[in-house]
Image (cartoon, helix red, strand yellow):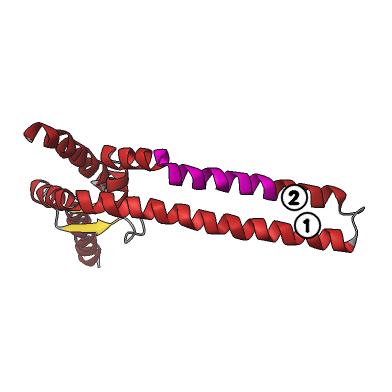
Amino acid sequence: MKKLVIYIACLGFISLFSMSSLAQNVAVIDTQAAILQTQVAQDAFKALEEESEYASMVEQAKELQTERQTLIETLQKDAETLSNEEIAGLQKDIQEKATDLEFILGKIQAKQNETIQVVAAQLNPAMMQIINDLIVAKKIQLLLGADQALYFDGSVSITEQVTDALDGAANAEPESN
């Protein structure tokens, strides 16, 4: 019996060491975050914000939200003194503002998604090379997407390293031209 307990304990220690050595060969990456945190992406979003059409949509969304909020406050404050028709009219106006706001926010989101796609297409080849280089350099045996892992210690994430390497590649690119 004592030998069985010792045997089981030894197996436990061996599996513990095997798991820790396996963990050293596992990495996690959030490719979208790696791309979005680059200077290229930040510059692209800054340029988007400076586009007149986009800036106009953002301003329009802010105005619609303010108008909608004012109508809501009016309805809440004056509900007791308003007629049913006036309440229905305010509710209709609030709904119309909400619909308009939703439409404008959809257009804003579409422009942002378009910018993300352009930046991702631009950086994806370099990112894949950087990831491959890190896999070789760190002897990674298993690479998971951050959205695929239920939990991971930040120390196994290579996202920041990929972002830094992409920024380094982008900075080196103008010099080589």
Please tell me whether the stretch drawn in magenta is mainly helix, strand or loop.
helix
* Residue 123 pos. (x, y %): 20, 48
Q: Is residue 22 above or below residue 157?
A: below
Q: Is residue 37 magenta?
A: no
Q: Where on the picture, by quarter, is residue 36?
A: top left
What residue do we see at 56% from left, 58% from top? 102
* Residue 95 pos. (x, y %): 68, 60
* Label 2 residue SS: helix
Q: Nearer the viewer, residue 161 or 64?
A: 64
Badge 1 vs badge 2, beta-carbon distance below 8 Å: yes
Q: Nearer the viewer, residue 70 or 134?
A: 70
* Label 1 residue SS: helix
Q: CA distance from mark 1 to mark 2?
A: 7 Å
Q: Name the amino acid, label 2.
A: Leu
Q: Name the amino acid, label 1.
A: Leu
* Magenta span of residues: 49-68
